[in-house]
Image (tube, grey):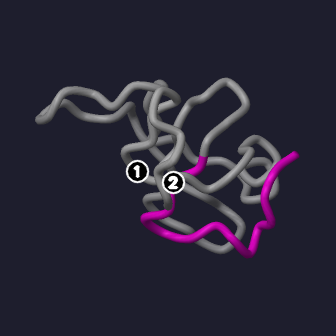
Amino acid sequence: MGVSVSDIAVDKCFRTSGNQVRRVMEVNGDAVVYEARGHKLPPQGQMWGPKTTVNAEKFAADVEEEVAWDWDPDFQNQQP
C-alpha cells in the first residue's frame, strides 16, 4: 500500500505491514533516516533500534500508514 513521499517528515511514525513502527529522525533530500521498534513499545528508558538510512521512495513503499509513536496493535484507536 504505502504512503506518499510528501507525507514523510521528522518525528512522524509509520507502521509496516509486519507491525514494525518506524520513527523518522531525519529527511535529507531523497534519504530518510529512521529508527524502528517492534509492535510493542519498549519499556521506558530503553532505546528504539539503531538508525537506518533508506531512499524516501523505498521508505514510503515499505510502510502502510502513519501511526502514533506509542502505537500498539492491542490499542488500535490511537491517533497519530
Q: Residue at x 52, y 29 (%)?
A: 73
Proximity of marks 1 and 2: CB atoms separated by less than 8 Å: yes
- Say which label, 1 or 2, has the lower sequence index: 2
Q: Residue at x 81, y 57 (%)?
A: 57
**At label 2, which amino acid type do we have?**
Cys
Q: Label 2: which residue?
A: 13
Mark carried by residue 69: 1
Magenta segment includes 36: no
Percent x, y for residue 58? Answer: 79, 48
Closest to the observer, 25 or 45: 45
Query: Mark 2: which secondary structure?
Result: strand
Quadrant of the rendered structure where residue 71 is? top left
- 78 versus 8 height, above or below: above
C-alpha gap between disc 1 and disc 2: 6 Å
Looking at the image, residue 62 lies above or below residue 5? above
- Residue 12 is a magenta residue: yes
Residue 17: percent from left, percent from top: 73, 31
How many other residues sit within 10 Å of disc 1, few (<14), some (14-19) or many (≥20)? some
Tell me the residue at 61%/41% (across/down).
15
- SS for dot 1: loop
- Amino acid type shown at disc 1: Trp
Viewer-nearest residue: 5 or 2:
2
Q: Which residues are magenta?
A: 1-14
Magenta stretch secondary structure, dominant: loop
Q: Horizontal placement of 2 versus 38: left or right?
A: right
